Image: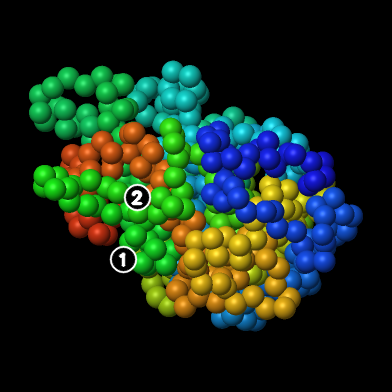
Amino acid sequence: MSHGSSSAAILAPRSRFYHGPFGRLCENLPPWSPPGFFSTDEPGIDAFLLDYATGTMVEAPGFTSGEIAADADERKRLDEKFDSKIPAGYTYFGQFVDHDITFDPASSLVRQNDPNMLHNFRTPRLDLDNVYGRGPHDQPYMFDPEDGAKMAIGKIDGTDLPDLPRFGKRALIGDMRNDENSIVSQLQLAFLLAHNTLVDRARVLAKKEKRKITDNDAFEQARRTLRWLYQHIVWNDFLPRIVVDDVYKAALTLKKTPDGRKIWQAGLKDVYNWKKQPYMPVEFAGAAYRFGHTMVRNSYQTNAPERGFGEFAPIFDNNPGLDDPDDLRGFRPLKAKNAIQWDWFLDMKSSRAPFFPQFARKIDTKLSNALFALHEGPAGDKLNILAYRNLKRGWALGLPSGTAMAEKFNIKLAPLHAKDIDALWYYVLREAEASPSPGMGRLGSTIIAAVFAGLLKGDPHAWINVNPGWTPGKDPLLKSGANGDNRDDKSWTLASIIRIAGIKADGVGLE
């Protein structure tokens, strides 16, 4: 379908009165088109985007990620040039969060589709529906058949090591995308195990207090605690690593009211606001939040016991001809050598600098070679080139230019060079590349912080609305843990999920 059709308008009409599943932050800004093109129907735009993606946005032209994984000198060169100081685990936590708030099953990233049909089937809330699905009554196969309050857990074939529950190769989880690679699949597994730990704690606490507790009660108590801890981690651990500090502080603040109470207030309502319930802005979903694609490395060390120190596994080896390639792609049973040793991916007490944790790539205009030629679609399909796919999607959605959005919100313009394009996704990456902060620049930070603050404020079940004074250290199920849970609220991070789950931080398997 040509961009000149009304598809983008139907997807997210340019009206401030529209409050559907998708909407626009900047309904009054015109769509961006590539330089030299004056009509969105002109032939050649598609070829321009493809040439730009393949000629400008790749780290090391001419290599596959498998070749880079095997070439120590090339790995070292790329690491020194492109590594950030953000632990690599947050790359995949960002992916996990994305799968929690957006999902359009009709809009496969490997198929052409009609944008008229784009619909967000995910609740735009940080509610872990990618973990819990529709719950134990509607999707009982996701739950432990011997304990209705707990999530089902599988095992790696021939071992006692945990894996996602599977039927054949298919993971029985709330969102199949959380099995796309071995790292995000094990984040999903960590949340399942953490829920089960919290169920046990709810029962122990009830017994200690001499009160009865049903399976449903235990499930709901565990789910609420895990959801609130997850929301806390997203806001207090993940976002500060990504967005500019003063933008982050302005986006959501705990304010004292004249009568002495404290309430959470969203401070960027001029950027993102909603009338009845939050919607998913296309500028966020189609551009700004796609920054995580630039954080993916070509390869990772996975664990010491099974694969070994100094051995690198490609995230994708770009070789679709192999039936069982030795890489970290998903949608298949986990292998022990691909089990994640979390102190190699997160900054934990047992991490051993300078080797660990491994770091994510910088947020910049270069994507790793692993994402240059994915094998999700037919060989030779242009949509296998992720940079092209993102540029094409933003163009098809009628997103404004980065410059126009920055001017609208009175943000200092990014230093675009003559070769740079003003597509919103590329613009926020170029801005991040030029920023002195380790994450995003100011426009990208403003979009991301405003949307996350708005999603939290718009969720009637979020901790900031139900119990504004809640902190992890005050939660009965988190206080009662004996697994080394944090006592200092400032240190409740993604690593806390690993500890609550009972996963070994410095090895493979469960404690």
Name which quarter of the figure residue 15 lies in: top right
Q: What's the amino acid at mark 1?
A: Lys
Task: Work out whether residue 237 can be spotted.
Answer: no
The residue beneath circle 2 is 266
The mark that comes first in sequence, 2 or 1, is: 2
Q: Which residue is located at x 49 percent, y 56 percent?
A: 447
Nearer-the-camera pick, 505 or 4:
4
In percent of width and height, residue 397 lies at 68, 47
Q: Which mark is residue 349?
A: 1
Q: Is residue 492 left or right of residue 35?
A: left
Q: How is the image coloured?
A: rainbow
Q: In which quarter of the image is the N terminus?
A: top right
Considering the numbered disc 1 on the image, is that residue within a helix, a strand or a loop? Answer: loop
Task: Work out whether residue 427 can be spotted.
Answer: yes
Q: Which residue is located at x 31 percent, y 45 percent?
A: 229
In percent of width and height, residue 354 lies at 43, 78
> Marks 2 and 1, Cα distance to the nearest angstrom?
34 Å
Q: Residue 156 carries which label?
A: none
Q: Which residue is located at x 64 percent, y 69 percent?
A: 365
Nearer-the-camera pick, 423 or 337:
423
Q: What's the amino acid at mark 2?
A: Ala
Nearer-the-camera pick, 96 or 56:
56
In percent of width and height, residue 375 lies at 75, 51
Q: In this view, does 239 lie above or below 364?
A: above
